[in-house]
Each structure stands twice: as C-alpha cells, then as structure tokens.
Image: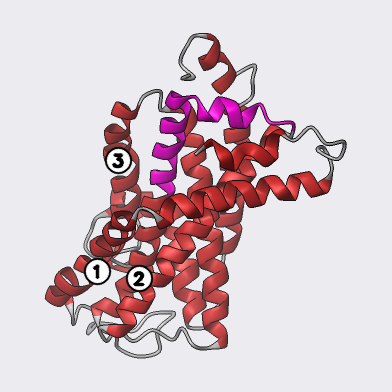
Amino acid sequence: MNTAALPLTSTSGARHGPLHALQALRAIVMREVLKFSQQTGRLVSALVRPLLWLAVFAAGFRNVFGIAIVEPYDTYIPYEVYIAPGLVGMVLLFNGMQSSLAMVYDREMGLMRLLLTAPLPRPWILFCKLCATALLSVLQALAFVAVALAIGTELPVFTLAGVHALVAVMAGALMLGALGLLLSVHIKQLENFAGTMNFVIFPMYFLSTALYPLWKLQESGAEWVYQIARVNPFTYAVEWVRFALYGKDPGLAPYVVLGCLAAFFVLACWGYDPQRGFGQLAKRGGGGG
C-alpha cells in the first residue's frame, strides 16, 4: 500500500518542480483507483442504495408531478425522473463521506503522516486526495446513470446538455469531497464516523431538493424544512445537475457549489496545518503510527 507514496519521497533535484507535483497527483489518484478496483463490494453497495430508491421508493410516487409543471421541466414527468439527479447526488455524497472515513483510517494507521511529510506543499497533497475522491465519485455516478438508463429511466444524457450536467457532477463531487476532507480533520477515531453519518450525511440529503422540490415543501407548510433546504449546499449541487440536464439556467447553483468547494478546501488545509489540526493531533499521539 505504501508503494503508491514512493514517487512523493524522491530525492531527485526536481522533486519540488511541477513534474514532481504531477507525479504526486498521478501516484495518489492511481493508489485510490487501484484500491477501489480491488473493492468490488464498494461499487455494488454504492449502486444498490440509489437503485433501491429509484426502483422501490419512486414506484409509490410515480405521478407526484401531475399537479404542476415547474422548471427545468417543460412537461409532466414521473417521479423517478425527478429524483434521478438527487440519487446521483446521493452517490457523490456517500463517496465523499467515505473518503473522510478513509482519511481517518489512514491517519490511525500512520499513512497520512507519511503522505503529509512529502516534499510538496500540504495543500497540493490534499488537493491530490480531493481529485482522487472526486474521480471515484464521478465514476460511480456514471455507473449509476448507466444502470438507471438500462432499467428505463428517461434522462437526456446523450446531448450537449449532458456534457454540462457532467461538469455539474464533477463540481458537486469536488465540493462533497472537500467537505469530507474537512470532516476528517475533526473525526478523531473511526468509531465516531457513525455519528457523522447521523448528523451530517442524512440531514444534508433529506433536507434538500434531492427527493422533493422546494415549492412542494413550502406548499405543504414545512417552512423550517424549506428554509434549511434553501441554505443547504447539497441542494445547489443537485439543482445544478438537474437544470444542466435540460439545458436550463441553474441560477446561483454553480456559484454556491464552487464557493462552498473553495471554503471547505481552505478550511481543510487550515485544519491539516502542522501547527493546528493534524500536526497537533500527531503531537498528542492522535495521528496514528
């Protein structure tokens, strides 16, 4: 497992140059991809969860949009078409949080200490980890879309708008991966990850537009849920994908997603600063190894 970090510890004269930085990016991304390729159960579990929602939950609400036609849709749609972008977001969200779990595990095993002492700027190392997480998230999301299309869900992915939607998926994957990085700063032990599931993942998913539109929340009188969903960054990640699929203007969604991506990543870098987050944990024996 440590072999993937070998290019980071090269003693060549160019180790601080752009070439070495790109080698580090390749090494970290390939390490995560190879590790993922050996965990077929991880891909299956990542697909089973949203597919169950698509095949079972959506069946009971198939005609929920028979009341009104709202953007980005120009006609009535079945419920499974509406929640498909939200289920793509579910894949991105759970993989982003799983990357947080992997970071905590690597820290307890001492691998993060080895990685973070590489002769490269710490933000670049974290950016490489973020890129690896986002790549795996996007690949899993594409696998889900392929299966959803195979079972008959109508999604306009083979269009120019589909390319825009892919960009939105990539941005959402980066934002949620950055959130996972930030959470890994504060999760001290693997046992605490269950609490993160309960207090971060599920509220972020259910208090968003992944399963129901904002106007439905307001119409039903769930004002507090409506207000939380409006400020939930996950809402904007899902809405960007949803509007992009149909070639409509996503409004503020790209700005919110990219702004949160930058904020989460900067805070994660601050948390992994040797004088603050991970460095202080290591001094107290919390860094593993």
Q: Is residue 167 above or below residue 283?
A: below
Q: Earlier in the sequence, mark 2 or mark 3?
A: 2
Mark 2 belongs to which amino acid? Phe
* Magenta stretch, overall SS: helix
Report the mark closest to the observer, 2 or 3: 2
Contact check, label 3 and label 1, Cβ < 8 Å: no
Callout 1–callout 2 Cβ contact below 8 Å: yes
Of the numbered discs in the image, which one, if any, rests on residue 144?
A: 2
The residue positioned 50% from the left and 68% from the top of the image is 240
From which residue to which does the magenta span run?
A: 96-119
Residue 234, horizontal then vertical, whole percent: 43, 55
**Residue 39's x, y, as percent?**
35, 53
CA–CA distance between discs 1 and 2? 8 Å
Q: Is residue 119 left or right of residue 183?
A: right
Residue labelled with disc 1: 51
Q: Residue furthest right?
A: 13
Identify the residue at image location x=33%, y=67%: 213
